Amino acid sequence: MPGNPTTKTLSMTQVLLCGAAIVTLSMGIRHGFGLWLQPVTQSQGWSRETFAFAIAIQNLVWGFSGIFAGMLADRFGAFRVILGGAVLYALGLLGMAHASTPFLFSVTAGVLIGMAQAGTTYAVIYGVIGRNVAADKRSWAMGIAAAAGSFGQFLMVPTEGFLISSFGWKEALMMLGLASLLMVPLATGLREPGFAGHAAGQRQQSIFQALSEAFRYPSFQLLMAGYFVCGFQVVFIGVHMPSYLRDKGLSPQVASYALALIGLFNVFGTYAAGALGQRLQKKNILAFIYLARAIAISLFLLVPLSPASVYVFSSVMGLLWLSTVPPTNATVAQIFGVAHLSMLSGFVFFSHQIGSFMGVWLGGYLYDRTGSYNLVWYIAIVLGVLAALVNLPIKEASINRKDALQGA
């Protein structure tokens, strides 16, 4: 593999088992944060915008920190990065439980957990996959890892709802903090041979050369634009839909089941997207996903709201939820190679997280100003159509480095 800094690779089975388990825990815990919105704000006397702002900060820090987590993982291997992320996750969750002011809540739920997610989710795990899985199976393997994150949502969201109702929201956070430390032993299975201080010297490009090449390449910019929309849509829905449904008179259990259904169906959606990425043009897969999301949201708002309509919407959105992740990251690997994959994936994901920040914050801000989520739903529809259009011109072929460095 070009740019592979190791002389020996881990087995694909080991990489997928350990990587999938880490993503299951990290993403599973994260997907349930919307369940805490009303318990926390009602207990602390805070507005929804206060909670939403902390989660928005989390997404922004996650994206920004992911760039540096990716650099470190490409340079020294994923093990140390995941280890640090797991410890930060535990500290952040414990801190959320004891934060007495909006500022402390933003530091713990926002900064600490955002940094933790950067070190324990896709950019780092996909770097390991890229370095240790053959190119003809890479998109499929990325689909497996993304499906694990979806299974984590299906498994963890009802569990988190049960913990909140049975023990209280503070105690539930402390239990999850302890559970997040299970990522520490799992990280040992991703300790790659050959990552010593000299590893980067075997690459054909420096970090700055790789960044210059990527940001001057139009297809990279288009991938970032589409991923912005992905972040806006999924984080707005994931955080605010439980409160939206309760505002409409539906029970909290409907929201928990809805988020669980998103996770369950996304297991199939992400796996299918990864597998199809080995056979079809990935840009067309992405365009279809974004357009289908826009249609699904439009129909959800048009039909009468009921538990049945919520479950149908959640199932359809589940198929489309994180199914953007395998084709997006596989496209980055296909164009630029794997030597700097974690870092470049981190930059693309940063765009995703800027969208996440806007989606979750605007949800809280516009709700507090208008008393409704309607405007944000409409924005999500328009952005979905635009994202479908910007993915169509992407060129997936491996980059001609001589032309790229000349600005082609």
Image (cartoon, grey):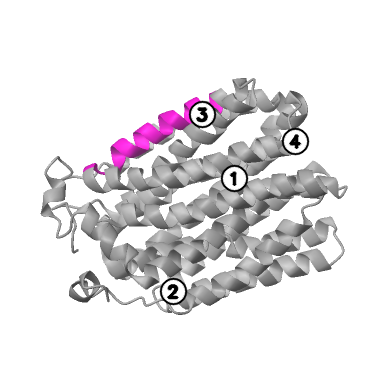
- Seen in the image, is 257 located left or right of residue 342? right
Give the residue displayed 42% in from the left and 33% down from the top. 86
Picture coordinates of residue 204 (x, y %)? 14, 60
In the picture of the structure, the residue carrying the numbered disc 4 is 38
Q: Which image quadrant for residue 47?
A: top right
Q: In the image, which disc is placed on residue 92?
A: 3
Figure check: 120 above or below 179: below
Magenta-highlighted residues: 76-94
Q: Please state which amino acid type lies under the numbered disc 4.
A: Gln
The three-letter amino acid code for the residue at tag 1 is His
Is residue 367 shown left or right of residue 95?
right
> Residues under labels 1 and 4: Cα distance?
15 Å
Q: Is residue 71 left or right of residue 275?
A: left
Q: How many marks?
A: 4
Judging from the image, what secondary structure is the residue with disc 1 in? helix
Is residue 246 placed above or below 318 in the rendered structure?
A: above
Instruction: Give the number of the mark in front: 1 or 4.
Output: 4
Q: Residues within 10 Å of mark 1 (few under 14, many from 20)?
A: many
| Label 3: element kind | helix
Which residue is identified by label 1? 31
Chain-order first, disc 1 or disc 4: 1
- Give the distance between the C-alpha atoms of the residues marked 3 and 2, in whole angstroms: 36 Å
